[in-house]
Amino acid sequence: MARTPLHLRFGRFELDEARYCLLEDGGLVAIGPKPLAILFHLARHRDRVVRKEDLLEAVWPGVTVSDDAIWQSLHKLRASLGPEGAQTIETVRGIGFRFVADARDAAAPAPAGPQAPDSAGPAFVGRESELTLLRAALRRASATGGGLALVVGEPGIGKTRLMQTLLAEAEHAGMDAREACSREGSGIPAFWLWAQVLRGYAEAWDPTALRGALGTGATALGRIAPELRDALQLELPPSADSEESRFRLFDALGGFLRRAARIRPQVILLDDLQWTDADSLSALAFLARDLRRERVLFLAAAREADVERREPLQDLVIEYAKNDALLRVRLGGLTPAEVGLLIEEQTGIRPPDEVVERLHRKAGGNPLFISQVLALAPVVEEDAADRPAGTLLAPLAGPSAVQRVASKRLAGLTPTCREALEVAACVGTEFSFALVAQAHGGERGALLEALDEGAAQGVVART
């Protein structure tokens, strides 16, 4: 007898085996095939701990891979689940892994009682001038032609949040929106950025429409996007790594987006360009010429320092500027007035001017830092329910505020996590996994898990 496809809900997520996808609040989650396969296997066997050997056999059948493959895929899976990642997949040391989220059959009625609060994140404040520029770019893309809108700024300044806001507005206006995010680290395949974009089209479009828009470029693009191969059942001849094959791939990508734009205006969010591979950047530079009169807008974000010093990013900016298709938006810190609004939105307390000024000065207007400090206000001042606003908020802007926040948060972490964070802190306020792993000297899988715990508790943030 055929097995009933798995269909579960847990928190904001829905796991649907019939469509073989993970949804968050009804929207598709961009997740790789191996992390998704791990999630399905663990969810099917959530009544027990799944041994590492069984997981390897289920997800990599007939293939010999190292244990690091599991750890890397689990890390990506937990990252895709956000703060809930550590509470969804439990590692049982020395045995294996277990799906531990509170899940129910998606067909069952929702439980009665109060709904969970909206967890979309801190309030979005300010950025009116930047939004005005980017909205104008959306209107141009919808009417006559797009280009590249590049948002630059320091880590935590709000680049991704700003672009996600624009992407939602584009979808609401009837534009076809896709997104991709680069990753830091080794082993990332060439054209990874475009593989994610094409995966989005393969998941959202009807196969007949998809094949028509791909045209003769289906074979070239199918080489970099397994989801296209699966959706269209493509049989690919042996690949040829040459300058000609690269040009054919670029041309196929441009042709596909041109045909897609004639159906609906296309908006493609490309996050963290500072980590994007050179091949993906070369393809994007090619499109500056190929799509300059088409209704395609690329919304991209990168760290400002990397744009200035990384040659492929410089070449990309020059190419779009040369074709008069570049909008560059620099994102700075919030103004004192905006910091005050952020405090009021997040705490429900109207802060005194002196508190706003001090916190603005210490945080440089960085919304990520401010939000992390404010999120701990009730923890730092547990007995302050009836105290005046100035008394409640003043300690947050004081010289020991950051130390007190850090001490409260670190107290609830495991010793392994605290040790990993101590090593990371020696590297600096911004660090790469490779450098911390080298300094730590321990098992890479355990270090990944420790940093995942820190991210789940909000002590560190992926940028």
Image (tube, rainbow, N blue to C red):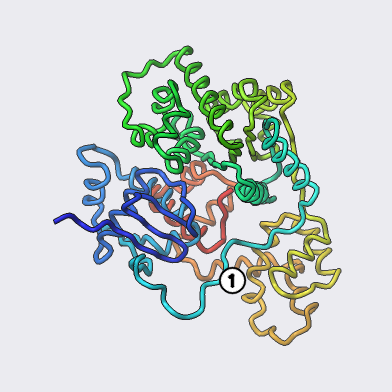
Q: Picture coordinates of residue 48 (x, y %)?
A: 24, 65
Using the image as rendered, state which of residue 207 and residue 365 is in the foreground: 207
Query: Does the image show residue 429?
Result: no
Using the image as rendered, state which of residue 149 and residue 100 is in the foreground: 149
> On screen, 342 above or below 319?
below
Task: Choose top left, top right, bottom left or bottom right for residue 4.
Answer: bottom left
Using the image as rendered, state which of residue 362 and residue 426 is in the foreground: 362
Kindly give the residue lying farthest to the right in the view shown.
353
Query: Does the image show residue 331?
Result: yes
Residue visible at 73% across and 42% down? 134
Secondary structure of the residue carrying numbered label 1: helix
Identify the amino acid type marked 1.
Lys
Q: Picture coordinates of residue 110 (x, y %)?
A: 41, 73
Task: Choose top left, top right, bottom left or bottom right for residue 357.
Answer: bottom right
Compared across the picture, whether 26 is left or right of 446 comes to: right
Q: Picture coordinates of residue 106 (x, y %)?
A: 36, 65
Q: Where is mark 1, residue-wise?
A: 408
Q: Picture coordinates of residue 139 (x, y %)?
A: 72, 40
Residue visible at 75% across and 66% down? 399
Task: Choose top left, top right, bottom left or bottom right for residue 189.
Answer: top left
> On screen, 445 above or below 455?
above
